[in-house]
């Protein structure tokens, strides 16, 4: 049986304040557990059904664990349908070094608010081999439970940095002289313009796009053209736009 203190701790991790205080977050589900193991993430403790523990003993090794009933997992889970395993995971704190980004293709996110969008963008970045993401300080917390689930384990494989995005982009330009691309409704057609692989791609807020402050740092405006002249939608969902943009950038490597 889980103690009241353990239940209180896990529930506290459903808040940003709790995660910042304890320096850990919750990841739920067998798939994410296996991604955590593969990436050598620091799992502080596992709470799972007895049968799950028995089936996964070879993977657990020296990780502390505690068994729980389905009712107990339901009480501490943030999901509508609780999984068989819940992991308490240490928050990793990578140090942002601009020089390390100079030869990479990097995504920068300006005020992304929706957890589903954030998680999907992280998953998209991982799929296309993009290892670093810059987030403005007012983006949704990546360790929000909905974000973690939406990444489907990609959160373990991506370095994500919160920063003063405008200042960071200005410093990046001065340090590297690489282009900073921004996605806009009006810009160069992404399918015909020149795209460099050492660069930053900026994606903006769901409702308001890229802020004026960030826009001033962008030296290459790109757009995903619509092929339907009667389309009523004004813009694409940001996570869909991220998928298309990343795909086109990586496609150019094949064509080069």
Image: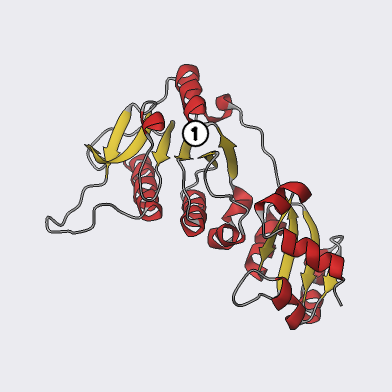
Q: Which x, y percent locates residue 169?
A: 47, 27
Q: Quadrant of residue 72?
A: bottom right
**Residue shown at 47% from the left, 17% from the top:** 174
According to the picture, the residue beneath numbered tag 1 turns out to be 104
Q: Which x, y percent locates residue 38?
A: 69, 56
> What quarter of the picture does the N terminus occupy?
bottom right
Query: In the rendered view, does 74 fall on the left or right side of 184?
Result: right
Figure check: 29 above or below 132 = below
Q: Is residue 122 visible?
A: yes
Query: In the rendered view, does 134 fall on the left or right side of 56?
Result: left
**Residue shown at 86% from the left, 65% from the top:** 5
Q: Quadrant of residue 152?
A: bottom right
Query: In the rendered view, does 91 fall on the left or right side of 160?
Result: right
Circle 1 sits in a helix, a strand or a loop, which is it? loop
**Residue shown at 78% from the left, 50% from the top:** 22
**Residue shown at 36% from the left, 34% from the top:** 181
Q: Quadrant of residue 7?
A: bottom right
Q: Which x, y percent locates residue 238?
A: 38, 51
Q: Is residue 40 visible?
A: no
10 Å neighbourhood of mark 1: few (<14), some, or many (≥20)? some
Residue 54 versus residue 42: which sits nearer the camera?
42
Figure check: 20 above or below 230 = above
Q: Which x, y percent locates residue 212?
A: 36, 32
Residue 218 versus residue 176: which sits nearer the camera?
218
The residue furthest top is 174
């Amino acid at each position: 049986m889980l103690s009241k203190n353990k239940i209180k701790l896990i529930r506290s991790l459903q808040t940003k304040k709790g995660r910042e205080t304890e320096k850990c977050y919750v990841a739920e589900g067998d798939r994410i557990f296996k991604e955590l193991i593969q990436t050598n993430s620091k799992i502080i403790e596992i709470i799972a059904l007895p049968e799950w523990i028995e089936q996964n003993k070879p993977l657990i090794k020296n990780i502390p664990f505690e068994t729980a009933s389905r009712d107990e997992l339901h009480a501490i889970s943030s999901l509508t349908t609780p999984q068989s395993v819940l992991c308490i995971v240490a928050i990793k704190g990578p140090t942002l070094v601009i020089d390390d980004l100079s030869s990479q293709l990097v995504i920068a996110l300006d005020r992304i608010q929706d957890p589903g969008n954030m998680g999907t963008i992280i998953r998209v970045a991982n799929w296309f081999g993009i290892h670093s993401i810059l987030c403005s300080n007012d983006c949704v917390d990546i360790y929000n439970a909905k974000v973690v689930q939406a990444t489907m384990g990609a959160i373990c494989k991506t370095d994500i940095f919160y920063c003063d995005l405008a200042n960071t982009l200005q410093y990046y330009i001065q340090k590297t002289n690489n282009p900073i691309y921004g996605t806009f409704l009006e810009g160069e057609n992404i399918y015909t313009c020149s795209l460099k692989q050492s660069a930053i791609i900026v994606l903006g807020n769901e409702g308001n796009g890229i802020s004026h402050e960030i826009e001033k740092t962008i030296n290459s405006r790109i757009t995903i053209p619509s092929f339907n002249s009667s389309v009523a939608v004004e813009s694409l969902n940001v996570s869909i736009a991220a998928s298309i943009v990343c795909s086109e950038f990586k496609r150019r490597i094949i064509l080069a």
